[in-house]
């Protein structure tokens, strides 16, 4: 990961920090690959129960660092090309990795959250933001489309006409407007503290149930009725066969906090 990304683990909560504050956490190729790598590491670490994704310094992420990456044409081409064994390239993976994780991911948005930075945040399960944060689908400024999975994640959260208006204009909106539109989950003067509070609540829940909820909601969003009901049955059956559901049931009946074992299922 080098120094582009830092990771801190505490009591099942992992905080991943974009760490180029002098460049407004702009995405260069090193950071893109570091995000992919840390996501892969977290997926393999079953002790992780919740991820908080944030930016160091004055903002979350101002998007792609064009001034730097344009000096690395070979690296850009390699990152843009899709490996034959995968359905996405490195730029897309640095966002989609948070969607794939079998744990809740909370993005903390403050300051600028533009372009690729916004697409990273939108791949999280929740976005906590300051009201004065500034968000933009900014690719149109450079004559581009949002291609770091943003066309998928934005259109899941807002009506298609709103998604197209944001992408076609590159309009900068506040955290307050973003919440009104549905891009932001919750506003807070201290979104880091708010994210920590939710993370602390979530680690009290069964990690298998959380993984199953994340998977089934994403799968069923576009599934037909029959497939959606089958997905519910399939995931619930696996959960019922696991130890953590029994622990949750026993704790609930005794009215005491449950003591869960590490996550058994990824539902991949």
Image (cartoon, rainbow, N blue to C red):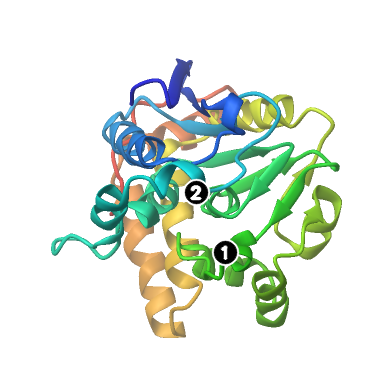
Regarding residue 65, the answer to whether it shows in the image is no
Residue 218 position (above or below residue 65): below
User: Residue 211 at what x, y percent from top left?
Assistant: 42, 46
Regarding residue 139, the answer to whether it shows in the image is yes
Residue 129 position (above or below residue 93): above
Q: Which mark is residue 66?
A: 2
Q: Say which of 245 and 22 sits in front.
A: 22
- Label 1 CA crowd tier, 10 Å (few <14, some 14–19, many 20+): few
Q: What residue is rendered at 47% in x and 44% in y?
A: 210
Q: Say which of 135 and 51 sits in front.
A: 135
| Image side of residue 206 versus residue 174, left or right | left
Q: What residue is rendered at 64% in x and 61% in y?
A: 137
Tell me the quarter of the image containing the N terminus: top left
The secondary element bearing badge 2 is classed as helix
User: Residue 220 at what x, y percent from top left?
Assistant: 46, 71
| Image side of residue 15 versus residue 74, left or right | right
Residue 211 position (above or below residue 48): below
The quarter holding residue 22 reads top right
- Label 2 CA crowd tier, 10 Å (few <14, some 14–19, many 20+): few
Q: What residue is rendered at 35% in x and 49% in y?
A: 239
Residue named by callout 1: 142
């Amino acid at each position: 990961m080098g120094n582009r990304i830092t990771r801190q683990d505490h009591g099942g909560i992992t905080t991943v920090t974009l760490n180029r504050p002098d460049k407004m956490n702009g995405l260069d190729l090193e950071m893109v690959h570091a995000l992919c790598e840390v996501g892969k590491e977290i997926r393999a670490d079953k002790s992780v129960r919740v991820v908080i994704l944030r930016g160091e310094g004055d903002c979350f992420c101002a998007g792609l660092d064009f001034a730097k990456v344009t000096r690395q044409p070979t690296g850009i081409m390699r990152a843009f090309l899709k490996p034959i064994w995968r359905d996405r390239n490195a730029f897309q993976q640095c966002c989609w990795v948070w969607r794939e994780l079998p744990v809740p991911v909370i993005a903390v948005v403050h300051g600028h959250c533009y372009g690729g930075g916004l697409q990273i945040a939108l791949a999280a399960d929740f976005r906590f933001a300051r009201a004065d944060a500034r968000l933009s689908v900014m690719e149109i400024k450079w004559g581009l489309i949002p291609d770091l999975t943003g066309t998928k994640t934005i259109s899941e959260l807002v009506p298609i006409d709103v998604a197209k208006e944001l992408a076609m204009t590159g309009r900068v909106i506040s955290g307050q407007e973003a919440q009104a539109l549905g891009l932001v989950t919750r506003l807070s003067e201290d979104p880091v503290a708010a994210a920590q509070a939710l993370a602390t609540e979530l680690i009290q829940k069964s990690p298998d149930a959380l993984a199953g909820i994340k998977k089934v909601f994403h799968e069923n969003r576009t599934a037909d009725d029959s497939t959606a009901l089958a997905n519910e049955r399939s995931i619930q059956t696996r959960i019922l066969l696991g130890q953590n559901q029994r622990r949750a049931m026993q704790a609930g009946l005794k009215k005491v906090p449950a003591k869960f074992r590490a996550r058994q299922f990824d539902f991949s």
